[in-house]
Amino acid sequence: NAGVMQNPRHLVRRRGQEARLRCSPMKGHSHVYWYRQLPEEGLKFMVYLQKENIIDESGMPKERFSAEFPKEGPSILRIQQVVRGDSAAYFCASSPRGLSNTEAFFGQGTRLTVV
Amino acid sequence: TQLLEQSPQFLSIQEGENLTVYCNSSSVFSSLQWYRQEPGEGPVLLVTVVTGGEVKKLKRLTFQFGDARKDSSLHITAAQPGDTGLYLCARDTGTASKLTFGTGTRLQVTL
């Protein structure tokens, strides 16, 4: 049973380009969470999705960022017109149901560098 | 607003020493989780504590949840280099929505 798969592991983008980060949850998991981690900091919640629906996007910037979790295929975190401040590690987690007293399994992350 | 404060932020110790790290909040948790994150990897769950006063052991790691469910501690006995990493506590919000992570304690264990 494969764990949470994120790709790419490393992504370099020039300012103004688009970044697409992919997350395939564990088999049987329909809940996906995206977190951002800046160097030497903890993880900051961005968005919570459940198949085809955004449940909570309170941690996601209103502009340039979007997320989806289609019926088929991985969850995508999309960052348009990237800026240097978007450089961070982006982690995806999945769970079989909502997170109240349920373990979340994390992927290895995508490290985005904006040059 | 940072809801979970972890201390110390950094800790460098020698192999064989004992250590304790703390996770504190001004509000009550419904449950609390501890994760360890190694460089270049995602966080891995170590334990979930739910009941006030609960103590859980995982080999050389002892986790305690405060009686009032506002704080937690992680004690490591006879630390080893393999314990090196970022230790994160996280609380859920009581809904299905998300985990809120603490600031983290970065532990370095040297030979």
Image (tube, rainbow, N blue to C red):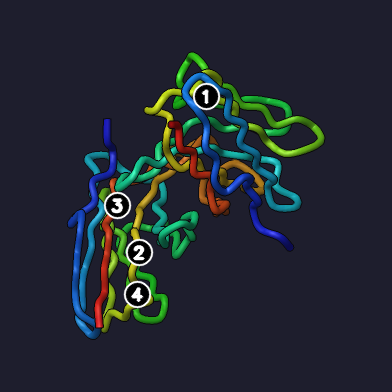
Does residue A102 appear in this view? Answer: no
The residue identified by callout 4 is B61
Check chain identity for marks 2 and 1: say if they share one.
no
Secondary structure under the numbered disc 3 in the rendered image: loop
The residue sitting at 61% across, 36% down in the picture is A21
Figure quadrant of residue B9: bottom left
Check chain identity for marks 4 and 3: say if they share one.
yes
Q: Which mark is residue A57?
A: 1
Query: Marks 4 and 2: in contact by CB < 8 Å?
Result: no
Identify residue type, mark 4: Leu
Q: Nearer the viewer, residue B87 or A90?
A: A90
Q: Is residue A36 above or below residue A14?
A: below
Q: Is residue A65 above or below residue A112?
A: above
Q: Is residue A10 above or below residue B8?
A: above
The CA distance from mark 4 to mark 1 is 35 Å
Check chain identity for marks 4 and 1: say if they share one.
no
Identify residue type, mark 2: Gly
The residue sitting at 27% across, 59% down in the picture is B106
Residue farthest along the right direction in this orientation: A72
Observer-side mark, 2 or 4, equals: 2
Identify residue type, mark 3: Gly
The residue identified by callout 3 is B104
The residue identified by callout 2 is B85
Query: Marks 3 and 1: in contact by CB < 8 Å?
Result: no
Q: Nearer the viewer, residue A80 or B31?
A: A80
Say left or right for B12 vs B83.
Answer: left
Neighbor class of circle 1 (other Cα within 10 Å; few <14, some 14-19, many 20+) is some
The CA distance from mark 4 to mark 3 is 17 Å
